[in-house]
Image (cartoon, rainbow, N blue to C red):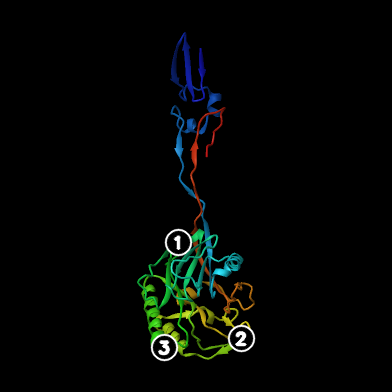
Amino acid sequence: MERRNKGGILKTTKGKQTCNKRVTFEDTPALARKTAPNHEKLNPGKEPVTRRGKRKSKSKIIKHLKILTINIRGVKSKTNSLTSALHMHGTHIAGLTETHLTNNEALTIKGYQWIGKNRDNKPGGGLGFLVRNDIKHLVGTEDSSNNEEEIEMQWANIKIGKGIAMGLFYGKQESARKEEVERQFQELTTKINEKQRNNNVIVMGDFNAKLELKTSLGQQIESRNGTLLAEVLTQTSTMTVNARKEHTGMWTRVNRKNPNEKSVIDYIITSKALLDQIIESSTDEAGILLIQGKNPTDHNTITVTINTKTKNETKKSKRWKREMKNNGSNIMKK
């Protein structure tokens, strides 16, 4: 007696002895050939093919990189408000200054990774980046332990296009000694020029410096720190995003009790090569992204969207495909 099993093997039974015989394409009737699975049509007479497919990465292309920066003036009581602002804006990377975190304290925001530099046993100050989880694989941090403690500056490297070196800066007050202010801006100049050798550069934060501004929204006279910051821009061939004609809003710091007391001391600075890639930039004077908490900040958020294309990370899936004969059809296993 002869019968064919599911694997395409013809079994011949003689008494208690059973012998297996491979059914070749030539042995198969014409009708069976038409219904044979693909592996037999392509490879007649061979075993069913089992193969492991390639890993498929379910990645999405990030067309626009969204950046936000603000002097938050103490972050501990503002995490809920900050989380809402980040989600509303769709922020990929946020730069926060004056976090008021000290020693080994860290900021925890769902969906983001914290990269911070705190003051040691000193009140005030502190800064850091919040990097959204789906692009954290593109962001590399730089060890800031060798930086002078008195100069509050943090750097991260972003693997996008040519590469972006992103800096975060918190400048000394206008009342600080001129020598200290000069030294911090000289260090910033050195860092920007060093980074620009191989990358485009973005530096954001509270520089505590008033650049000369003349726009339809208002005017600002250059301060002492502003003159030193202007020298940084000249020596590094960089520009402030705030000065773009397309930039909306102006005042980055407003006294909430006396709205007439306002200034522009927060900036986003970029390499000239990045200016053409900026889709939009804004200073949120309307308070849509205002960060609220126990001690309200008197600074407005600044946002910028940069045109870029890169992949954000999602979980990788493995797919195994096995073709086998089963009632004339293929069985797919995932």
Q: CA distance from mark 2 to mark 1?
A: 37 Å
- Foreground tag (3 vs 1): 3
Residue at point 41%, 65% (across, down): 141
Q: CA distance from mark 3 to mark 2?
A: 32 Å
| Location of residue 184 by image quarter | bottom left
Q: Which residue is mark 3?
A: 177
Mark 1 surroundings: few (<14), some (14-19) or many (≥20) residues within 10 A:
some
| Location of residue 188 by image quarter | bottom left
The answer to whether 11 is drawn above or below residue 326 in the figure is: above
Q: Which residue is mark 1?
A: 138
| Location of residue 263 by image quarter | bottom right
Mark 3, secondary structure of its residue:
loop
Q: Is residue 297 visible?
A: yes
Q: CA distance from mark 3 to mark 1?
A: 39 Å
Q: Earlier in the sequence, mark 2 or mark 1?
A: 1
Q: Earlier in the sequence, mark 3 or mark 2?
A: 3
